[in-house]
Image (spheres, rainbow, N blue to C red):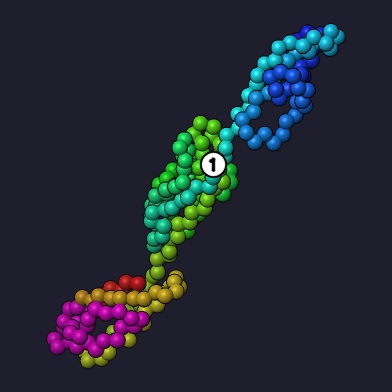
Amino acid sequence: GTGNGANEVIRWYNVPSGGSPISTYQPNISSTTTFYASIDNSSSTCEGSRAAITVYVTTIPGSAGGSASPSAFCGSGTTTLSGSGAAGGEAYRWYDVSSGGIPISESQTVNSTTTFYVSRYNTSSYCEGARTPVTVTVYTLPTASAGNQTICSGQTTSIGITNPNGIPGTTYGWSVVTSNVTGATSGSGSSIAQTLTNSTSADGTATYTISP
């Protein structure tokens, strides 16, 4: 660099006295380091006292551990994100992207499977470590469909139950409310086959409520 006066230049050193001038470009500094600057008159070769300039290097925090509670649920819901592994003077930041973005709160409402990311950061230097993914799984709620059926007393129902949104492994259960009908009971399965009897002169009904 140059000094304030004519013929003055700035000399840099890595020692407080003696030594040889160093380059003004110092890459790959891995720990806190003090450099020293002086002003040298290139005509008289007189050099002033050295001033200390310290470059502080803070260790980048390690990777954080992370969890979500609950980590899986059906439909949609709210999950609480928690970090682990922070050392003294460190805290956590949560994101919804793997890089960039802005920190988000630890309480998140999700309606589809979502991956969040947590990092540790130094609360003094704000140096931040790598992000760790934490996935919250949201399962699609299965649906059920069945048609109405009209039968005569003493006949057996044949009510097939289907799953319109095609969720594998879906099973069904049902409850029933009757009027003037006997033989209808709660149960489970993929179809309702029950022999229903009406001993009255009025029409009877059996109303099944099916739950996947």
* Amino acid type, residue under disc 1 in the picture: Pro
Return the x and y of residue 35 as percentages of the image width and height: 68, 23
Residue drawn at the location 84% of the way across and 8% of the way down: 44
Q: Which residue is farthest front?
A: 18
Q: Which residue is farthest left?
A: 200
**Is residue 48 covered in magenta?**
no
Could you tell me what secondary structure mostly forms the magenta stretch?
A: loop
Left or right side of 112 for 9: right
Relative to 100, does residue 12 appear above or below in the rendering?
A: above
Return the x and y of residue 103 as percentages of the image width and height: 50, 41
Relative to 201, does residue 91 appear above or below in the rendering?
A: above
Residue drawn at the location 49% of the way across and 34% of the way down: 123
Q: Nearer the viewer, residue 123 or 51?
A: 51
Left or right side of 20 for 94: left
Label 1 element class: loop
Q: Residues within 10 Å of mark 1 (few under 14, many from 20)?
A: many
Location of residue 47 by image quarter: top right
Q: Nearer the viewer, residue 38 or 153?
A: 38
Return the x and y of residue 171 as percentages of the image width and height: 36, 76
In the picture, which quadrant includes the C terminus?
bottom left
Relative to 185, does residue 31 appear above or below in the rendering?
A: above
Which segment is the magenta one?
A: 178-207
Q: Nearer the viewer, residue 83 or 76?
A: 83
**Is residue 181 covered in magenta?**
yes
